[in-house]
Image (cartoon, helix red, strand yellow):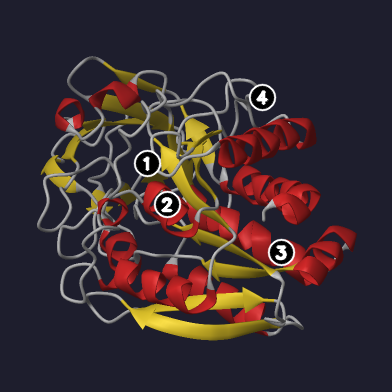
């Protein structure tokens, strides 16, 4: 018996939405494309809703410009995420044929959402900031504004007492890397739990937290840039109020309060592992910093199986660092431990999860492990 499928409706007119419909005349196989960032040629992030599915029937979707995306090699071994309720996300087997990324679903309900990674909605961000301010010892220290005027809160956990270490964590400079704010929610969760690790850490250090550096890009469904088309993680040598007010704000606050350690939280499209990149190419790099980096990595490895040191980026040669990156710029300016923490869009192949791949929940759990690691080395930072 042949089933006649109803027409589908594809929608991305919502927070972090991104898709272009090329041809939806065949409900069993819809042709799509990813929309580039505003004022930029970057694209990879997608997020859209499909309505009108026929339960029990298979629907296929192809992203026909995947081979032209910013990281075309990232599609190999990648599986899209899907959700029927925008709460529980699961991986959908996906195939890349060298041109298009395709995935299909045997529908269980009439509506479904697909995305490049489990999205972190702006509404949840707002709730996170409100929740954080209800925690004893956490305050909204300052707030900046994005190009389009969205709020960029800076939270501080701790009392700002003289002599305490100043530990900075910022996230989602690249707006499509939603695992970064899931990580920051994990930090807030631990602060709210106020367990022994948090109590001991805050006795010696203050945490300075910017949960989302690029709210405009995240809202518009960008992969890499802010509304002006600026890659914020290439703006730390020439930040301006006009083009990159997000970085300008963060730098001004760092200058006011100081930095003893800095972690810039990201996601990597290609590498199916959790890893860090550091400052070995900085002109001011010393053995003291090298020792701190090794201490961080070895400790985090011992705390969680979701971190490893075998896979990652090629190390910079001495004096050859790209100083426009936050990690290098902050490490050089404050002579401190400064790391880029990368999580995968795919899975963490050393500890895989077939159902979810790397996920929001795993990002949150990693945050707790990072706090435990920082506690072990807080006395050694200076």
- Disc 2 or 1, which lies upstream in sequence? 1
Camera-near label (3 vs 1) is: 1
Q: Residues within 10 Å of mark 2 (few under 14, many from 20)?
A: some
Badge 3 marks a residue whose secondary structure is: helix
Badge 4 marks a residue whose secondary structure is: loop
Q: Quadrant of residue 14?
A: bottom left
Badge 1 marks a residue whose secondary structure is: loop
Q: Which quarter shows the C terminus?
A: bottom right
Q: Is residue 365 left or right of residue 200?
A: left
Give the residue at mark 1: 283
| Percent of width and height locating residue 235 | 25, 57
Residue 332 bears which disc, if any? 2
- Disc 3 or 1, which lies upstream in sequence? 3
Q: Nearer the viewer, residue 110 or 335?
A: 335
Q: Which quarter shows the N terminus?
A: top left
Residues under numbered marks 2 and 1 in contact, where contact means CB atoms less than 8 Å apart: yes
Whole-number angstrom distance, CA of label 3 to CA of label 2: 31 Å
Whole-number angstrom distance, CA of label 2 to CA of label 1: 8 Å
Badge 2 marks a residue whose secondary structure is: helix
Whole-number angstrom distance, CA of label 4 to CA of label 3: 23 Å
Q: Residues within 10 Å of mark 3 (few under 14, many from 20)?
A: some
Give the residue at mark 3: 189
Whole-number angstrom distance, CA of label 3 to CA of label 1: 37 Å
Q: Quadrant of residue 182?
A: bottom right
Whole-number angstrom distance, CA of label 1 to CA of label 4: 36 Å
Residue 351 bears which disc, if any? 4
- Is residue 38 visible from the viewing direction of this image? yes
| Percent of width and height locating residue 293 | 60, 38
Q: Nearer the viewer, residue 283 or 323?
A: 283
| Percent of width and height locating residue 286 | 52, 39
Q: What residue sits 72% from the left and 82% below the top?
A: 159
- Disc 1 or 4, which lies upstream in sequence? 1
């Amino acid at each position: 018996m042949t089933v006649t499928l109803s027409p589908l409706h594809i929608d991305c007119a919502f927070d972090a939405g991104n898709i272009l419909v090329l041809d939806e005349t065949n409900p069993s196989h819809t042709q799509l494309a990813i929309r580039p960032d505003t004022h930029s040629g970057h694209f990879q992030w997608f997020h859209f809703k499909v309505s009108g599915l026929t339960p029990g029937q298979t629907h296929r979707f192809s992203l026909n410009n995947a081979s032209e995306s910013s990281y075309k090699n990232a599609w190999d071994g990648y599986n899209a995420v899907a959700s029927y309720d925008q709460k529980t996300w699961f991986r959908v087997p996906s195939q890349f044929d060298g041109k298009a990324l395709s995935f299909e679903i045997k529908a269980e309900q009439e509506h479904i959402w697909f995305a490049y990674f489990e999205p972190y909605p702006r509404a949840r961000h707002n709730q996170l900031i409100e929740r954080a301010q209800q925690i004893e010892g956490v305050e909204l220290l300052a707030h900046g504004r994005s190009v389009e005027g969205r709020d960029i809160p800076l939270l501080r956990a701790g009392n700002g007492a003289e002599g305490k270490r100043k530990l900075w964590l910022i996230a989602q400079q690249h707006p499509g890397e939603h695992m970064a704010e899931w990580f920051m929610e994990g930090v807030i969760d631990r602060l709210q739990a106020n367990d022994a690790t948090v109590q001991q850490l805050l006795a010696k250090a203050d945490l300075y937290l910017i949960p989302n550096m690029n709210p405009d890009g995240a809202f518009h469904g960008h992969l890499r840039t802010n509304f002006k088309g600026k890659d914020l993680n290439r703006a730390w040598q020439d930040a301006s109020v006009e083009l990159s007010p997000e970085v300008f704000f963060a730098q001004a606050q760092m200058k006011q309060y100081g930095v003893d350690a800095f972690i810039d939280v990201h996601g990597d499209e290609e590498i199916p592992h959790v890893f860090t990149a550091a400052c070995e190419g900085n002109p001011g790099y010393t053995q003291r910093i090298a020792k701190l980096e090794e201490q961080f990595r070895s400790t985090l490895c011992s705390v969680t199986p979701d971190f490893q040191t075998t896979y990652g980026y090629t190390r910079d040669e001495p004096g050859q660092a790209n100083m426009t990156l936050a990690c290098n710029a902050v490490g050089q300016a404050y002579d401190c431990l400064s790391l880029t923490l990368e999580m995968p869009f795919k899975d963490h192949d050393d500890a895989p999860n077939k159902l979810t791949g790397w996920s929001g929940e795993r990002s949150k759990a990693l945050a707790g492990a990072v706090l435990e690691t920082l506690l072990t080395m807080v006395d050694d930072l200076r």
